[in-house]
Amino acid sequence: MKGRFIKYLRFEKRLSENTVISYETDLNQFLSFYKEYSTSQKIEKVDKRTIRSWIVKLSLSNLSAKSINRKIASLKSFFKFLVKRDLIKKNPSSHVTSLKTDQKIPTFIKEKDINFLFKNIDVKEDCTGQRDLLILELLYGTGIRISELINIKISDINFAKKEIKVIGKRNKERIIPLHNNAIYQTKKYLQLAEKEGYKNQYLLFTKKGEKIYSMLINRIVKKHLSTLIKSKKYNPHLLRHTFATHILNKGGDLNSIKDLLGHSSLAATQVYTHNSIEKLKEAFNSSHPRA
């Protein structure tokens, strides 16, 4: 059964060899445990209690919750495959839940540093230089994801209403307001593009006039951020986190930020409140007479 599953991963799902090896390692560990745990060697005899006992054993071995969750996911995929192929009747892992993991507080750029960035950024006075500036302006000014930025068409921008349409996850469309500087930089970019003979339905493109791609945007963001700002990370998502944190710090409503970011639930947005709480603590400690 395991061999058929591995073959399925390799040839039907076309997963990378490293991923297949990872699945196989996780399954081998579970099957070794099952061999010791149970007198029965039949896979159809595995039940929810067996899987939970395995998870307990993994937890006691000082593995991180993230690593254990990966192993649980491997096992779930295996049993789903067996049920789908009628090799077993019931999926024993269907009600097994993943472990809770520590939620990381998003890294963001301080307001004074972001102002320093846009005041001191050095770009060429041509279409490519203006494109790089516009990428940073839109990422920080709207909080959009890199995938959303790549797919913006010129027709998605409404200059009269000062707003931009983006297509997010699961093809959900949302409208985001544009501030005056973003509009100015966009118009300037389009004028330079027309002057230099570029024609494209997409807003952002390469020097060859082709639609821009994520690796290039990552390089552009890293190049400009790393020269002017000290941070642990230099990627487009850093600007998205900074956008959300700055709005919240200025008194923005959490539900509004959720809509701007395109989050499906408020839980995903609430992570930004940690940064705001830290700022409140700083203000308290520096201002309160008894702090």
Image: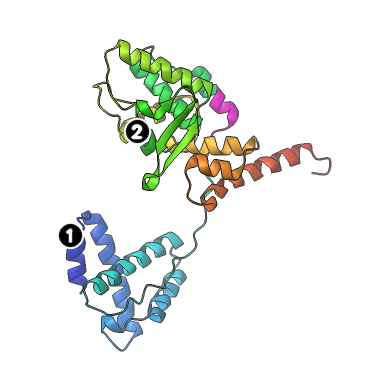
Q: Position of residue 110 (x, y in %)?
A: 58, 32
Residue 111 drawn in magenta:
yes
Image height of 106 relative to 59, above or below: above
Which label is found at residue 150?
A: 2
At 37% from the left and 62% from the top, the residue drawn is 70
Scheme of colours in the image: rainbow
Pointer 1 residue: 12
Where, by quadrant of the figure, is residue 61 drawn? bottom left
Could one spot residue 248 in this view of the protein? Answer: yes
Q: Position of residue 248 (x, y in %)?
A: 61, 39
Which secondary structure class fits the magenta region best? helix
Residue type highlighted by circle 2: Ile
Question: Quick one: label 2 or label 1, which is nearer the N terminus?
Answer: 1
What range is drawn magenta here?
108-115
Looking at the image, the residue that sits furthest to the right is 289
Q: Secondary structure at mark 2?
A: helix
Q: Position of residue 173 (x, y in %)?
A: 41, 41
At 42% from the left and 70% from the top, the residue drawn is 58
Image height of 58 relative to 214, above or below: below
At 52% from the left and 53% from the top, the residue drawn is 103
Q: Position of residue 245 (x, y in %)?
A: 57, 38
Looking at the image, the residue that sits furthest to the front is 160
Residue type highlighted by circle 1: Glu
Left or right: residue 137 compared with residue 50:
right
Where, by quadrant of the figure, is residue 35 drawn? bottom left
